[in-house]
Image: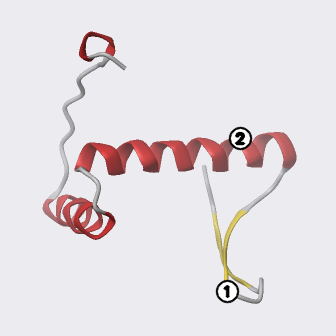
Amino acid sequence: MEDRDKKRLTLDFDPSAYELLEQLALQSGKTKAGLLRTALALYAVAQEEEKKYNHKLAIVDEKGTQLKQLIVT
């Protein structure tokens, strides 16, 4: 994607949310913008699966046991 095709967005975060964004970006090796793009893509997949197939996003252990279900609204 060329720079002229990109859109700029200004966001306000409270201090704890910004700290979390910085920590996750550092841990993942992504930029903050890259991390937000990944999060947006993940949210889109979760929402589509919920709407089309009534599938749920879940955290499972190595045996496939569901530990948590994530609600996407």
Q: Residue at x 28, y 61 (%)?
A: 29
Q: Which mark is residue 46?
A: none
Question: Relative to 57, does residue 62 appear above or below in the rendering?
Answer: below
Q: Quadrant of the N terminus?
A: top left
Residue at 26%, 60% (x, y): give it: 25
Instruction: Check disc 1 and give the amino acid type.
Output: Asp
Give, as a three-letter code, the residue at label 2. Answer: Glu
Q: Is residue 45 above or below residue 23?
A: above
Q: Position of residue 69 (x, y in %)?
A: 67, 72
Which residue is most to the left? 15
Q: Earlier in the sequence, mark 1 or mark 2?
A: 2
Identify the mark at residue 61; answer none if there is no mark: 1
Above or below: residue 71 compared with residue 65: above
Q: Position of residue 3 (x, y in %)?
A: 25, 17
Disc number for residue 48: 2
Percent x, y for residue 35? 34, 51
Q: Nearer the viewer, residue 1 or 13?
A: 1
Residue for point 64% across, 45% down: 45
- Determine whether the residue tagged by mark 2 lies in a helix, strand or loop: helix
Question: Along the horizontal axis of the image, is 49 left or right of 11?
Answer: right
Give the structural element (helix, strand or loop) at label 1.
loop
Q: Name the residue: 24% across, 28% down.
A: 9
Give the percent coordinates (x, y) of residue 8: 23, 23
Please give the count of numbered marks on the rendered protein. 2
Give the CA separation, mark 1 to mark 2: 23 Å
Q: Nearer the viewer, residue 13 or 59?
A: 59
